[in-house]
Every structure is written in C-alpha cells, then in structure tokens.
Amino acid sequence: MAYDYIIVGGGSAGSVMANRLSARSGTQVLLCEAGQDTPPGKVPREISDSYPGVAYFDPRFHWTELRAHIGAVSHNNPTVDRPPLRKYEQARVLGGGSSINGQLANRGAPTDYDDWEARGAAGWGWDSVLPYFKKVERDVDFDGPYHGKTGPIPVRRIPPEQWNLHARAAAEAFRGAGFPFLPDQNGEFRDGHFPITISNFEDQRVSAAVGYLDPTVRARANLKISTNTQVKELLFVGKRCIGVKALVDGREQDFHANEVIVSSGAIHSPAHLLRAGIGPSGHLRELGIDVLAHLPGVGQRLMDHPSIALSSFIKPPARMTLQQSRRHVLVGLRYTSGIGGAPQGDMFVVCVSKSAWHAVGEQIGSLLVFVNRTYSETGQVKLTSRDWRAEPLVEFNLLSDRRDLDRLMSGFRHLGAMQMSAALLDVTSNPFPASYSERVRSIGVVNVKNRVLTWLVSLLLDGPAALRRYLIDNLIVEGFRFEELMQDDEKLEAFVRQAAIGVWHASCSCRMGADGDPMAVTDAAGRVRGGIGGLRIVDASLFPVVPCANTNFPVLMTAEKIADAMLAGH
C-alpha cells in the first residue's frame, strides 16, 4: 500500500504528527515504531506510574546497545584520554521519551526561540511558537495568555501543601537565598522557585502516545500504527525519498509514500540520514557510502544540558514515602548565574526527594543543578559501520566551553550553601557530592537482588549516625567529599569534570537554518536540504540550540507547528 506520509519513529514528535496528519480523512498515514505499543487500557504499569524511576531503568523500553561519550573529547588528541562510553538511555517504545521521562512540562525562555529565529529558523520566534505550546496542553490550574485549555496533554502542578517535608525545606532554602515563589513556572519567565509543571493527571503519566493516540485517533481508518517495526533503510529514486524498508515483527517489508518524516530523535535521526548518504561527504566516503547529498551539519553540534548533583540523607519524617503522591520532583528553581554573559534564567535546579526506586533511594535526596543555557555545541553523531544494526558513535562533548564548567562549579557552591541552610539541615544530614556512576546505574536496575541488597543497606543507614557516615563515605561517595569541594577550587573542578552528565536532552544534531547556512540540515519546515525531496525531520534534532527547558514540550510544540505548516501546504 502507498501512503501519503510515513513517520519513522513513534515518539513524542511522531505521535503528534500521526494525530494531526491523519485528522484529514483523505490522507493515508503510516506510523512506524521500533518498540512496543502502549494501547489504551493496557499501558504498562511502569510507564503509567507517576514516579518515573522504574520505567527509566527498564530495558524493555530502551535501545539497550546505545552508548555515548559524555565528557569533552580533546580535539588535539581525540584518541587519548577519551571519556568512557556510558549507556545512554533512549526510549524504544510508543510515546518515546514521554513514556519514560520525568514528565516535566517545561517550555523554556522566550529568548530561546528568538535566538532560534536569529540563527536562521525563520518563523520560530517566541510569538510564533507560543500558540503551539498552548495547542499542546490542557492546563488544569491556570488560564490566560500563556496557557492552553483544550490540548491533548494535561498539565498540572502539585501545590506546596501536598509536598513532603524535604521538598518544603528545599523551597524554604530557595526562599532564604533570595528567590521568590512563582506559582506558575510557565508564566512570566523570571528567576524564582515554583511547583514543577508536569504532564500528569490524577497521579498518572500522560505520554504523547496516551494523549495524541487515544482510542478516537486509533480508530481512524486512514491511520496505521505499526509497532515492533524497525526502519532499516530510507528508499530513494534519485534524490527523492519514496519510502522505507522495515522489519515488521522480524519480517522485511517495503512501504512507499509521497513523503517520509524522520522522527527518531537527535541520535537516530542523523544516523538514518548518514546511512542514506546524506551528510558530511568525507565521513560517508570513509565508510564507503555513496554521497547522495553533502550536508556537513548532519550529526554535528549535538547538545545536552550538563548537570551535577549534591545529595544528602533524608531523615525519616521528611521522606516522600509518607505522602499520597508518587511524584519525587516537586519544586524547582530558576536563577541567573551572571557568568560569561549568559542570559537570564541560565541555570535550573530541581529538588529530588527520592533518588531511586529502591529502599536506599527513598533515603537519599538531591539538589540537582543543570546549565539551562549551555554553550557547549561541539557534540556529534557519526556512523561506526554501514550496518544498520550498529549504533552510531555519540560524543556529547559536555563542558567543551569553559563557561559551562564555571557555571557548574558556581552552581555546586550555590547548592552547598542552600544545603547548609537551617531549613534543609533540619530534615537532612550527611551531604555528599553525587555521581551517576556505572555502580549507581547497576543498582538502579529493577531486580530481586537489588531490592534485597538495598533493603539491607537501608536498615543500616537508618541506624547509628557513625555507622551511617561510614556507609556513605565508603559505599556511596566516589572519591570526593562535600567539605573539600566547598573549599578547594581544583578539587571542585576535578569533581565537576568527572561527574557532570547530561540530563537526556539530546538535541540539535540536524539543525534547521537559513538558505546559505552550510551547517543547516533542514529549512524552517523540517525539509531536508541538499536537493533532497520527499524527506523531513521533525524532532529535537531540528533545534538550532537546546532551549532552557526539558526538551519534551519543545518537541511537542515543534511537531505541532510543522504539522500545521504541512496541512497548509508548506
């Protein structure tokens, strides 16, 4: 069967595109998703859970072989002292990242989108994107010029009176540091602390698949949702994309369409293009791939938000286990660093009242800071093989710009000062610099061994203070102590360089831009440049720069805007 549109990837963007394009009854749409379905009434319990820490570690919902270099790679000696390869969790399930992420419904700053437009993405300034942010959401708390009331994704906030004592203490520490309370995170963009805005209703996750692919949409005769369908190749006649070759439940099939929309995320979308011969010609020739279009920006300038954390032991009365909600991130803080000419609101802090699903996780809270407006733009995605089954080489090059390092160092000191406030000292003890190491990751996998092990350790942590200090210093802390980092710049820099990780906001690897920009991969409507026909990209890889936000809502907005343009004939 020939389709009007084939969508490669059923994540957040793909779910939006499938909904909006199939709303026109004469349009035939095929949505291909490599992972499993999350059908109405049968969404896996781990995904629907308001607490995301289980789904996020569940390999059923991941590209399990994907690895990435997180830290900076030296351009002078790229093969020496390379940062280690780490598992990089990217969703492989209908709904994509929205099915496993933290459910944070954050838009970013108006200046982010004005910067997009200044970088060549015509029509993507704040005034142009705000209507599409509003189209995404159904805000159950606020009305007015910043908010939508009829969109597929419910948006809400948990009020302070329902917070656990740890979250309340963090809010008091933020207030004591001079940051006012803002009832609405997505209202006026200014510094302050606020209830985190979440894509969640009745304490259940509402993914893009749940919100956009509801029973009414699924019943459309012109929409085919094909899960367990991995696209292995884009098909071309000359320089026009005419369809895809895919494995459907392990059986190879060809599908044809007037237009193919690649919505596979900022790692796999550029990989699809590279395998088709679209990208930097030198890299393609090295792998023996015929060059269809020389587009040097494909896979380049990959970005994420670098982050670090300061953790502490939460005293029993302050833990979230006493609360009705499963939400573990309730309060956030936006502030301006004043470093390196950064714009207002360039830093973001969240209070995490439960660090993992297990018994020890319930005892450990964190203040996590990330660089909301990062300057490190030297990451890349490259192929390692012509084999479509091989994951690409991913290098984020976090902290490649010194201003990001300086802001994380300053941010850690800010966290330390707030951690030592009377409010947080009353509900926590034993602060320590945290690292999302392979050891932490392995303990985070849901299994009986980890459940039993962490339960035993949790009993000891709730024991005498001296024993708790010993266990934290010898079982949890990895090489650095809180007190020394607050006093020693060299040790703090070493810790930040070693411990900084991204926050799974991969973006910008197939940027949209203006005519004549040699690094622009698409135009402002997502159409691939280089004389390629019938091919668009719609996902976070399009971003000209990563916004001051968790990327899920900017992705939903982007898909809404491009779908609207396509239906208007653009």
Image (cartoon, helix red, strand yellow):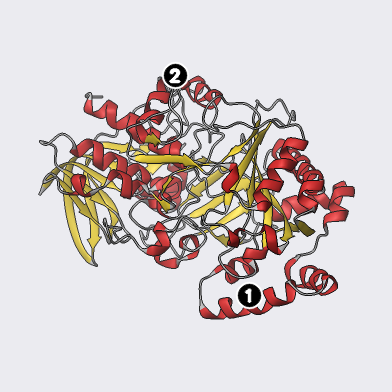
Q: Quadrant of the C terminus?
A: top left
- Foreground residue, 514 or 188? 188
Report crowding for label 1: few under 14, some 14 to 19, many 20 or more residues within 10 A (C-alpha): some
Identify the element where label 2 is drawn.
helix
Identify the element where label 1 is drawn.
helix
Give the tally of numbered discs.
Answer: 2
> x, y percentage for residue 568?
23, 23
Kindly tell me whether residue 89 is visible in this rendering: yes
Mark 1 and mark 2: Cα distance apart in space: 49 Å
> x, y percentage for residue 35?
33, 60
In the displayed image of the protein, which residue is found farthest to the right? 487
Relative placement, left or right, of 522 versus 248 is right
Report crowding for label 2: few under 14, some 14 to 19, many 20 or more residues within 10 A (C-alpha): few
Q: Is residue 431 above or below residue 476?
A: above
- Quadrant hosting residue 86: bottom right
Q: Which residue is located at x 40 percent, y 66 percent?
A: 60
> x, y percentage for residue 92?
38, 58
> x, y percentage for residue 173?
75, 42
Q: Which residue is located at x 10 percent, y 36 percent?
A: 26
Residue type at numbered disc 2? Asp
Q: Is residue 344 above or below residue 291?
A: above
- Say the numbered circle drawn on residue 454: 1
Q: Which residue is mark 2?
A: 127
